Amino acid sequence: MKILVTGGAGFIGSMFVRLVLDRYSDDSVTTLDLLTYAGNPANLLDVQGDPRHRFVHGDIADAALVDELVAESDAIVNFAAETHVDRSLLDPSAFIRSNVHGVYVLLDAARRHGRRMVQVSTDEVYGDIPEGSFSKEVDALLPRSPYAAAKAGGELFCRSSFVSFNVDVLITRGANTIGPRQYPEKVVPLFVTNALRGEPLPVYGDGLQVRDWLHVEDHAAAINRVLRGGRAGEIYNIGADNERPNIEVVRALLAHLDRPESLIAFVPDRPGHDRRYALDWRKIRDELGWEPRRSFDRTLFDTIDWYVTNDDWWRAIRDGSDTFSNYYQRQYGWRLAAAGRDGETVTTS
Ligand code: TYD
């Protein structure tokens, strides 16, 4: 199979590219990626030179380019997206372009050429989930952040393309994913790299928000199952049953790195912060036989160890240009100042 992987230079996308090339010797992959701040050619270094992989620098919203690439492919898996809730609160415009319009452009090409498309979405489309309940695929979409609203919008175009035009499109909704090569704005890589630098870990609000933590290799394997065995028009939740309050994750992370809890800084909360996401993922297990392979500890500790070992990868992002530091200052400058922790660097070794 020839697979077009959009957003393949990103965190989950690059893991999926690697999985396909490793496991399926008859498959080939074209990665289409715009290489915005989070897309990183370094994420694909180990497949560079593989004759079954081709990289194309471009935009999923570029209809002519997408049409050409979809025509040459058997299937599309769309990882291309703006993904960070905090950035969507600062400026949602790029989210609407990639997560809604970009998805529409891909769907339109899938329709014209009769191709299967997997849309990689998120548990955040369900919104805040009360203690004791778990979102099912049939539940209402109640997004609460601009990011989640844009992802839900993209999903609704998928649904309408299936219903109106019979496009062979499937949706996955993944839990919070961690692992190698995640841009260090997300909580785990941000906190690991801050801890390694002796800088405070800015915990929003009371730190009792709950997320379900999924390893990126487990997530990529689930998407692969959906691509190869899923039913057209269906939605599949991808969870891990690794629910933890943020503060517990932060304490485990510091203990694993042998850094002091005094690095924790409770800072003003994210507006509209969802307290909990939790998925019922029995459908993908029962229909497609997928299960996560990693426990919570393995998911977290393998992730931490990767950043410890791959210092060059994250230092190039954090120190290589102003992109990261400008964002960091805007997002955390006033929060750390409000907590009395600005300008703090502690020697922890
Ligand atoms: P994040 O990694 O941004 O994922 P999402 O918001 O998509 O779930 O955040 C995970 C949790 O960590 C979320 O409850 C927000 C919290 N968080 C902090 O407390 N401090 C931070 O600096 C960040 C980035 C997140």
Image (cartoon, helix red, strand yellow):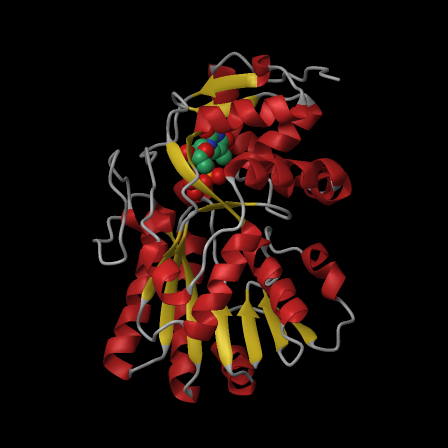
Give the image location of residue 288, x and y in percent: 40, 66
Q: Which quarter of the rendered picture does the C terminus lie within?
A: top right
| Residue 31 can be seen in this image | yes
| Residue 327 can be seen in this image | no
Q: Quadrant of residue 260?
A: top right
Q: In this view, does 131 lie to the left or right of 330?
A: left
Front position in the image: 257 or 84: 257
For the point 57% across and 54% down, the residue is 217
Give the image location of residue 150, x and y in percent: 35, 55
Give the image location of residue 148, x and y in percent: 35, 49
Relative to 316, residue 171 above or below: below
Front position in the image: 292 or 314: 292
Relative to 348, residue 75 above or below: below
Q: Which quarter of the rendered picture does the N terminus lie within?
A: bottom right
Give the image location of residue 251, x and y in percent: 53, 22
Q: Quadrant of residue 97?
A: bottom left
Front position in the image: 238 or 58: 238
Relative to 132, residue 33 above or below: below
Front position in the image: 100 or 225: 225
For the point 51% across and 18% down, the residue is 265
How many marks are shown on the rendered structure? 0
